[in-house]
Image (cartoon, rainbow, N blue to C red):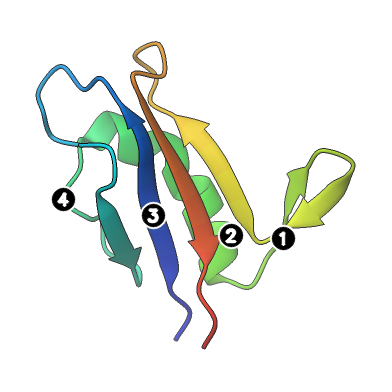
Amino acid sequence: MARVKLTVIESRCRDGLCRTGDEYTVEGVCPPMCHELWSCIYPQVFALLCGGELDCGEGKAQSFEAGCPDGARVRVRGELLPR
């Protein structure tokens, strides 16, 4: 089964749910993070879990960076882990 690693690369989370350096491995179930952030990144996570590639500058990649909808107070990097 595919797995995606999520790493919090920056955090100014109002509720303290995410801290810089936190890591989560996703295999299909929402990790313990706020639902607003998860709602923003789930489409990219799902695409990677299904073997997809995402637009990345001029090319494609099996990774992404995204921020929460609250002014990007929390930024994460997601990347497909090798099997």
Mark 3 → mark 4, Cα distance in angstroms: 11 Å
Q: Are marks 2 and 1 in contact (CB under 8 Å)?
A: yes
Mark 4 → mark 1, Cα distance in angstroms: 25 Å
Q: Which residue is mark 4?
A: 32
N-terminal label among 4 and 1: 4
Q: Which residue is mark 2?
A: 47
Mark 1 → mark 3, Cα distance in angstroms: 16 Å
Residue lying at 34% horizontally and 14% vertically, measured from the top left? 70
Residue type marked 3: Leu
SS for tag 4?
Answer: loop
Q: Nearer the viewer, mark 2 or mark 4?
A: 4
Residue type marked 1: Glu
Residue 6's disc is 3
Q: Which residue is mark 1?
A: 53
Residue sticking out furthest to the front: 21
Q: Nearer the viewer, residue 28 or 19?
A: 19
- The local crowd at label 1, few if under 14, some if 14 to 19, many if 20 or more residues have their Cα within 10 Å, is some
Q: Residue 73 sits in which quadrant?
A: top left
